[in-house]
Amino acid sequence: MTQLASVLVSASAAQTTAPPSKAELAEITRRGRLLAEYDVAAWHATDAVKALKPVDGIVTHYIARKTDTGRVVVFGRLANDDQSFLAAFEAVQTSTPTNFSVKVNEPPTSLTGYFLNAAYAIDLARRNFTEFSRPYNVAVIPTGTGDWWVYLVPAPTLPGVWSHGADIRFRVAADGKTLLETRRLHKGLIEYTTARSDEELKYHFHTHMLDDGPVDTDVFIVLVRKPAVSEFIVSEKFVFVVEVDGTIAYLGTSKDILKR
C-alpha cells in the first residue's frame, strides 16, 4: 500500500480545545464542494473559450455562476468607467459538468448586478493578496447570506502534479467593495504527484501545525485530485479524514490515534 505524507502550516485565529462539531464539519464540506464545482466549471469553460482564440485584453476576469440548470461562466472585463462588466463570452454548461457551449458577444454585453459585484470582489481580493510569484486560480462564491467568499488557490503548473496550500479566503461585502474578513487557509505549499508505477495509491495525509481542524481547500483538493483518495489530517490535538466525496469525519485525538 502506498501513501503520501506532507506537512502544511494552516493558519487560524486561535487554537481550539474541542474538535469542530458535525455541523461545522458539514459546512466546511459544503464550501469545499462549491469550490471544487467552481474550479471544474472554470477549467472546462476556459478551454472552450481559448479554442476561439480571444483577442488579447478582452478577458481579464472569469466568473462562474451556479444556476438551476448548471454553471454559466462569463469571460470579460470591467468597463473603462468601472460601472459595468463587459461579457465577451458566455459559456453554458450542457450535458455534463465538463461540457460547455460558448456564446460570443459582439460587442460585449454590459452586465451589472451579480457579475459586476463579483468582479469588484475579485479585484479587491487580488489587491489584498500580493503573493503572485506563481499562477493562482480565483473563485468568487456567494456565502448564502448576501456576501461573497473569494478564494485564491495555487494553479497546477505541471500535468499530474497537485498543488496544496499557500491559499487564502476573503469574505467581501455584497457590493464587492468592502473587505470583511481575511483568512489564510494554509501558509505552506506542497506539490506532489499521485502517479505510481509500482503500486496503487491508497491515501494521502498531511499535518496541520497551526490549525486544529480541516479547511475548505482540504475538501477541494480531495474532490479534484486524481486518482481519488482520502486525505487524513493530523493537527496538534485532533485527527480527521476527508473522504473522496468530501465528507469529513473526526477520528479522535492525535494523542490517542498516533499511539496506536
Image (cartoon, helix red, strand yellow):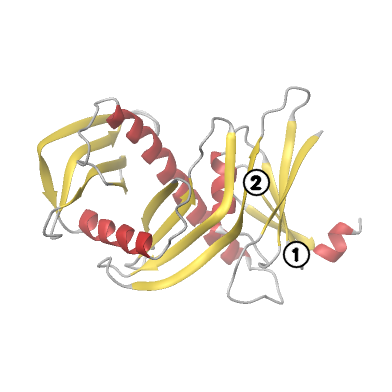
Helix, strand or loop for disc 1? strand
Q: Quadrant of residue 147?
A: bottom left
Question: Residue extending furthest right?
Answer: 260
Label 2 to label 1: alpha-carbon separation: 16 Å
Q: Amino acid at mark 2?
A: Glu
Q: Amino acid at mark 1?
A: Phe
**Residue neighbourhood size for the residue with mark 1, other residues' Cα within 10 Å, grouped as few (<14), some (14–19), many (≥20):** many
Relative placement, left or right, of 177 versus 153 is left
Q: Secondary structure at mark 2?
A: loop
Q: Which mark is residue 243?
A: 2
Residue 146 position (above or below residue 72): below
Q: Quick one: 238 or 42, which is closer to the camera?
A: 42
Residue at 62% of width from left, 36% of height from top? 228
Residue positioned 65% across, 46% down in the render = 243
Question: Which of the image's four quarters has the N terminus?
Answer: top right
Judge left or right: residue 108 versus residue 161: left
Pointer 1 residue: 238
Please report contact status of discs 2 and 1: CB closer than 8 Å, yes or no: no
Q: Position of residue 31 (x, y in %)?
A: 48, 56
Residue 51 percent across, percent down from the top left: 29, 25
Residue 199: image x %, image y %?
78, 26
Image quarter in which the C terminus is found: bottom right
Task: Indicate which label's residue lies in the foreground, 2 or 1.
Answer: 1
For marks 2 and 1 on the same chain, the one whose residue lies earlier in the sequence: 1
Q: Is residue 100 visible?
A: no
